[in-house]
Amino acid sequence: MGKLTGFLEYERTLPDDRNPRERLIDWKEIHEQLPEAELREQGARCMDCGVPFCHSGDSATAPIVGGCPINNLIPEWNDLIYHNRWEEALDRLHKTNNFPEFTGRVCPAPCEDSCVLGINAPPVTIKNHEYAIIEKGFSEGWVKANPPKRRSGKRVAVIGSGPAGLSAAAQLNSVGHSVVVFERADRVGGLLMYGIPNMKLEKHYVDRRIALMQEEGIEFRTGVEVGKDVHAADLQKDYDAVLVATGATVPRDLPIDGRELGGIHFAMEFLTANTRSLLDSEHADGKFISAKDKHVVVIGGGDTGTDCVGTSLRHGCKSVIQLEIMPKPPLERAADNPWPEFKRTLKVDYGQAEAIAVQGEDPRQYLQMTQKFTGENGQVKQLHLTGIEWKLNDKGQKVPQPVAGSERVIEADLVLLAMGFMGPEGGVLDQLGIETDPRSNAKAEYGRYLTNAEAVFAAGDARRGQSLVVWAINEGREAAREIDRYLTGATILP
Ligand code: FAD
């Protein structure tokens, strides 16, 4: 495989992201790309390790054990890149992933955490190869619509057009079923469109894939909220199978004093309105929540919070801080630990890098508990905080304890709540009588996806809880396989 000595000869090299100060004045993606010759060298670093852990993700143990949830044939395409066989690399990539242009941009790359080379050297730049292969595929005109040769006569309704619904639709359509995707938003893509901001994924890349899917025969009905505009039980009657892929969109709230004040918003209100206004009018309609000249406080240290930081900085906020109740992760893995564990070390994501460039320091503050909001004239102005430490209680559980004397008040004109999501909304689940699990997600076994409702399947965040694009693709693809088996008694889908 590849160049046997490649991993000894070449250092891991990634393209620099665009300079934070320059990229803050636009909404374009932050990524750059390496020249092709350097990409080929990076492909040569894949060392034919014999057991490519990168290529197999395990749902039961993820994210503890990494590996690719969709079993991307990573060593194969690393090798094909090295040998300059890009079109074959694209073919291998599309075998397991319907949308490498999305994962190649936004996936946290559990594959790289599992790369065997990562035990004693920086891992292979797998995610960047995925991005390079698919973008070369599009620019060379190799990615084409591939409609099915014949139709099965079976009809499937997919509710929700995020990566789970889209991957299921693509797979079901490929074996000839007629698929209609219902989406309540005005644009297709789920969180790919109205969650993940432009700087991570420009929206014309989503539109480009949707156009191909339409050419392949998939029908998209936007602006249709199932449960309101159409009764979910009617879909169950009118279609041979239904897939619920509605995401986990109920946000976790912060019920403390002052929550009712103006200027306190859920992260998704802020991010969605921003993207919609950008797409509709490049912000000329003013229909977004502006952070301009405001002291912004983002509550929540995850990816959603980071997207709020990056968006606020682009608006021209006066300051931004990001609060986290958990302790600061270590900067590096422990010296006595030979295994890759990048996820448990401090990651400086794009939003933090931008805040450091503008404010001179990381916006994240750890071990912080919110006490109450106060304000003037109905608008939030301050947030009262206490430092905490995690201590064991009588039952042996770790609980946050306030640190005496650590109370303080910070300025806050705009507060963005990014503390995670509680599961899918009720409408569709109630109308179909779908049972939920203890975390309020649609109850359906991983690998089977069938709910208790007849001919109704569930996949993606609606089933698993808020997760990752790559897991949504995994579930959408597998749910399509189970639906095909249900409709025809057998399946060739993976
Ligand atoms: P979604 O993408 O949520 O799509 C569900 C769709 O269903 C939505 O379009 C919704 O409008 C529609 N819908 C809901 N109810 C109805 C109804 N009744 N009728 C019709 N349509 C309906 N993951 C990563 O891997 N990398 C990242 O960088 C990343 N960043 C993120 C940033 C943010 C701000 C957020 C919120 C999430 C991020 N994620 C990221 C997570 C990732 O986006 C999700 O895990 C993934 O999109 C889930 O896909 P899904 O198809 O299950 O649901």
Image: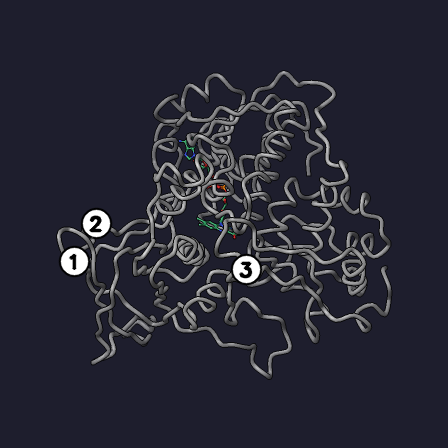
Q: Where is residue 235 shown, x and y percent of the image?
A: 45, 21
Q: Is 455 positioned to the left or the right of 262 in the image?
A: right
Residue that carries the numbered disc 1 in the rendered image: 375
The dot on residue 63 is 3
The mark that comes first in sequence, 1 or 2, is: 2
User: What amino acid is labelled 3 in the image?
Assistant: Pro
- Which of the image's four quarters has the C terminus? top right
Residue 8 is drawn in which quadrant? Answer: bottom right
Q: What residue do we see at 37% from left, 71% from top?
A: 366
At mark 1, the secondary structure is: strand
Residue 9 is drawn in which quadrant? Answer: bottom right
* Nearest to viewer (mark 1 / mark 3): 1
Q: Residue furthest bottom?
A: 335
Can residue 443 be seen here? The reply is no
Q: CA distance from mark 1 to mark 3?
A: 41 Å
The answer to which of 386 and 64 lies nearer the viewer is: 386
